[in-house]
Every structure is written in structure tokens, then in C-alpha cells.
Amino acid sequence: MLTMIDAGAPYGITTGPDGELWFTLVHQGRVGRLRPGHAPVIHQLDPPDGGPTVITAGPDGAMWFTEGQGGRVSRITADGEVTSCPADSPFGITTGTDGAMWFTEMRPGRIGRLTPGGDRAEFEIPSPGGMPAFITPGPDDALWFTLNQGNAIGRVSLTGEVTLHPLPTEGAAPVGITLGPDGALWFVEIGAGRIGRIDPAGEIDEYPLADPASRPHAIITGPDDALWFTLWGTDRVGRITPDGAIQEFPLPDHGGGEPWKAEPHGLTVGPDGAIWIALEAGALARLTSA
């Protein structure tokens, strides 16, 4: 099933504490929310040139998102009130176990920490040009992140100590990362067409996809104790079990009668238990995990 979003190009998506889907419209400088079965509500950002990308629920009941082009980490309430904090090319963002927002700053190669009260800290990554991308809490209270150009998985403790784990595959270019149902971190290798797994001790496994050019982008843990990921290069969604069994599924047809490039990016488990995917072509797709 597709929900067309006429107001722009969805990129990041997550389920908020209000039981609604929240998504970013990257090229239009907007944030939308959708209760399944209802019309979307769109909030225009001001200024509109920030390029909102990743969005997540904060510990304060609001939604937090990054604006990489505008250099901001922003917060939006249910009624659309937006506040922002300057940041240098932020991309990934998540809530840590300490109740703070943790985010990546791609170009300077830093990890940032911001509390809802405004306290801020930044931690340098020992990988010049490494471009930290997505970030997620681990099972050890630390934050784990991907280094897209550094070809590594990083870990930063709540006090700022950074450890890097190089990937065995050259040019893997990891992007999305999430905590899996098995207590390990699962990530995607957009450059190598593989799904990776790293346990808290740093042991890495990699699982090749059928098409090495499928360009996996984002990954989440589904409601079925498997990992779900988007395949930007082939307009598909994939599923991998903790023991490495992989399936791929086509996205719903847009019904326009002409081929289109869906461009799947972020995905989330919706309030209805289905997998929802942000398609930059202008829609939200819904897949059941059964």
C-alpha cells in the first residue's frame, strides 16, 4: 500500500510517542506526520533550506531531527512548534540511555550530545574524513555509529571515549545501523551490498546480498525479531534473520502506469505493526511483516 505525499520527498521516518508516523521532506524543508488511515499534516520549516533528514523521538515527548544543509539539530512539538540548535553538517540522531540526544556531524567528524535543557558536548572521532552517518544506542549504554568513508563501526561511551572497529571489506561505506534482537549491532554496507553484524566485543560478520549493487541504506529491527532494510539501488526492501537468512520484497506499485524510481530511504515499525518506508519519489509505503 502507498500513501502519496504531494507535499514533498520523504526521507527519514519514525513512529512518535503520539502513535503517529513522523517523516522529513528533505527537499522542501518540511516535517510531516501521519496517522494511518488519515490525511498527513505538514509543517513548513522556517527557514526552509535545511534539508531535514533523520528524525527520532526524544525523551521529552517531542520529535528531534537533523538539518544537514542548514547546520541545525531541531525539535518539533505535536502542534508544530520548532526550536533549533546549531550543528555542523548533522545527519544521524538518536536518544541515548542517558536521556540526551546524540547525533553525528559528518564533515568535521564528530559525535554531538545535546540535552533537552540545552547542555552540549562534542567528541572528536580519530578518523579524518570518516563521515559518521547513522547512530544508535547499543546494549552496553554506549552509542554505536557508522563511519561511511572511514569504513568502520564506531562506539562512543556516555563520557566520550571513542573506539573504532575497521570493517573487513574494503569500500563497504556503512550507513544505517540499529540494535538487533540478538543484542548485536546490525548495519548496512551501501558500497559493498552487504549486511553487517558487530557484537559488543567487536567481532564482525558480513552477509552478501544477491545484488552487490543494491545499495542498502537504512536498517531497523522489525516486530518479527528480524532486521528490515531498504535497498535504494533496486527499489526493494530486505529482511535478514539473526542467523543470516535473507529475503527481498518489491515495493508496492504507485499505480501511475509508468515506471518510477521509488528511492527508499528510512523505514520504521508503524503504530499498526507494519513496516513503513519513506520513498523520496513522494510516498510512504506500508508492508506487513507477516
Image (cartoon, rainbow, N blue to C red):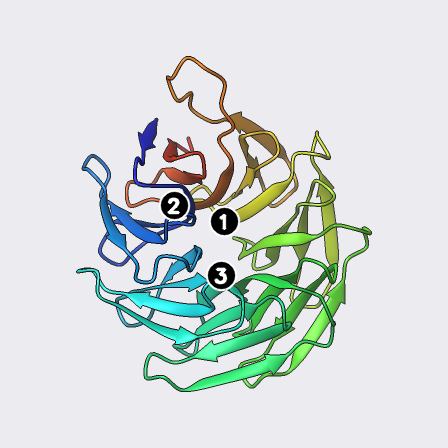
Residue 269, disc: 2
Q: Position of residue 115 (x, y in %)?
A: 38, 80
| Residue 238 position within the rendered picture, expressed as x and y whole percent measured from the top left | 56, 35
The residue labelled by disc 3 is 69
Front of the two marks 1 and 3: 3
Question: Disc number at residue 126?
Answer: none
Judging by the rendered image, the residue that carries numbered circle 1 is 220
Residue 253 image position (x, y, % from top left)? 42, 20
**Frontmost residue, 127 versus 20:** 127
Say which amino acid is labelled 2. Answer: Val
Q: Which element carries disc 2, helix, strand or loop? A: strand
Who is closer to the viewer here, 166 or 133? 133
Amino acid type at circle 1 is Ile
For label 3, the SS is: loop
The residue lying at 24 percent from left, 48 percent from top is: 42
Residue 174 position in % (x across, y down) = 67, 53
Q: Quadrant of residue 208?
A: top right
Give me the residue at 31% from left, 36% from top.
Answer: 5
- At mark 1, the secondary structure is strand
Closer to the chain start, of discs 1 and 3, is 3
Left or right: residue 128 compared with residue 183: right
Q: Mark 2 vs mark 1: which is more N-terminal?
A: 1
Q: Is residue 77 above or below residue 251?
A: below
Q: Mark 3 to mark 2: distance in Å?
A: 27 Å
Image marks 2 and 1: residues in contact by CB distance under 8 Å: yes
Q: Above or below — where is 266 with respect to 248? A: below
Query: Where 86 falls versus 248 (above or below)?
Result: below
Quadrant in which the C terminus is drawn = top left
Q: Quadrant of the N terminus?
A: top left
